Amino acid sequence: MTLAVRHTWFMVGRQLRNLMREPIWIALLLVQPMVWLLLYGQLFKRVTHLPGGGFGTTSYITFLAPAIVIMNAFFGATWSGMAMISDLDRDVLPRFLATPVSRISLVVSQIVRSALIAVIQGVIILLVSVALGVRVHTGLLGWVVILAAAALMNSAFAGLSQGIALLVRKEATMIAIANFIGLPLFFLSSTLISIKQVPHWMQVAAKFNPVNWGVIAAREVVLPGTDWGSVALHLGLLLALSVATAAFATWTFRSYQATI
Amino acid sequence: MDAIVACELRKRYGQVQALDGVSFRVRSGEVFGLLGPNGAGKSTTVKVLATLTKPSSGRAEVAGHDVVREPDEVRRSIGYVPQSSGVDRDATGRENLLLQGRIQGMSGHKLEERVNELLDLLGIADAADRVVRGYSGGMKRRLDVALGLVHRPQVLFLDEPTTGLDPEARASMWAELERLAEGEALTILLTTHYMEEADQLADRLAIVSRGRLVVEGTPEELKHSLRGDAVEIELSDGQAGDAESIVVALEGVHEASADGRKLRSRVASGARAIPTILSALEARGIGVESVTTHRPSLDDVYLHYTGREFAADNEEAGP
């Protein structure tokens, strides 16, 4: 177990070092969430005044900010399998597999790296949000919850993305699947708009949408009247999903090994 | 002591029988070559021995450990240099080596020293802190070899170490490998489809064809087993069949075989046999286009034991 943790740490280190070497990536990592926040924040500014309400605040940016942290973590996760495909294409994995490296660390490190980046981006989005006048109602604990939700949101789908990458092993297919999963789940959530404003069937579907679980948990701690039971439930659901998808990714890794 | 023991290894991928009963032994400290065309089963043999894939049946031991039952012990004792470079191209050479050492359980000062030693040994010290993406093919291949050596393995697997390199880089890689084999007290298993490479580097070699080991021995033994020089005669028109019966009856000719307009024969001495052969053919009115003779090469060994020309086999199997 300690070996698996140590090897995961080595592998995460490798990926982060490589990432930090590409300045364009750092810029994208920082700028992209800001674009979401500022673009959507302005575009839908007046939406909180809609009859029927359900926003819990009149400040749309306050409503939006925690959800952007989650959305960003989610989309980042759907793409995280690309790094695995790149390793597969370059035969980096067979070289590692001829060493006593912990097998599970090769998969888990990809998920950890992905979640870590989502958390870093989450911090940046929150800092900008605060500058834009957003106040996290539950304070520091609220920040921790939002970032935990982002990490779990990301790892839940990063596990899925890694698993798919190991099954399809082709970039183009991976991109198609990421889009196929990403956009519907995004629009079937209350990221941009209060759940009270959407058709009934969408409200029902959103209950089963993991993206919405993350949005609920993160938003609860930002707005007044936090329902801690709901926060715990939704974080728990995301945790369970993360475990399940990590297991799926590990299983697909075995099936990849069988093809060598 | 034997560093590698392979016993009746078989491996099946779907419909393809990649290995069809491969057995051989490699003594400690020996450089052993697996020579054969693409698709013959060389890489699959190495993958089984390096614990990347399990054999469908059969048994193998590397450095005294069973590859199926004790894979982690095997992995600690071996270095594996895959056919296609497995380096992380976005990292520097040094970072690649440090990571490889760490997952082999090395750390700290000792690891750093070993990495510096290898960078020097393989002549890539100047490029150590550059990202691998900018390396030449030869440099990248040296780094691959260094990666296999970080943890001072007992056995090194080199899967086609010079494929894709230009002739100059290949020659210098051969020199490096020769030095390594002497300096590091290593057992090396090398696969190649270059005859000269096997001839130059291997103490002993085996020819692999269609998932089987065809013959095994030192390069000299294999060449001597052919008894004498090769004489190749190209005829002006297609009467190689007649020519064969004429030539094979001559004194000093061990064997002759016709192949289209070509007549290949094996003789005790090329210099003495050629005049005899030419006059015998002339007497029967058979015209000759060209005659060549050479000492037996591994090409001839391959031809002799598989009944096929090496180059033709390579083309058939594709890259």
Image: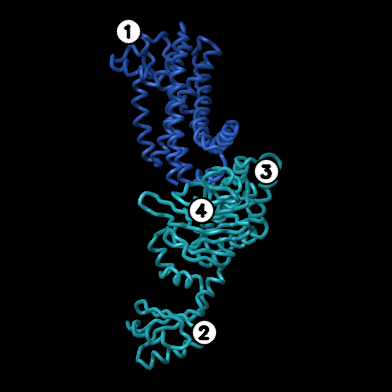
Chain colours: A blue, B cyan
CA distance for labels 3 and 4: 27 Å
Residue at mark 3: B111
- Residue at the farthest top position: A225
Question: Do tags 2 and 1 sit on the same chain?
Answer: no
**SS class of the residue under badge 4?**
helix
Residue type at tag 2: Ser
CA distance for labels 3 and 1: 66 Å
CA distance for labels 2 and 1: 104 Å
Which is in the foreground here, disc 2 or disc 1? 2
CA distance for labels 3 and 2: 56 Å
Q: Are marks 3 and 1 in contact (CB under 8 Å)?
A: no
Residue at mark 4: B46
Q: Classify 10 Å Cα crowding around label 1: few (below 14), some (14-19), many (20 and above).
A: few
Label 4 marks a residue whose chain is B
Location of residue B242 with respect to B113 vertically, above or below: below
Residue type at tag 4: Val
Residue at mark 1: A52
- Counting residues from the start of the chain, the first of labels 4 and 2 encountered is 4
**SS class of the residue under badge 3?**
helix
Q: Are marks 1 and 4 in contact (CB under 8 Å)?
A: no
Q: Position of residue B172 (x, y in %)?
A: 59, 62
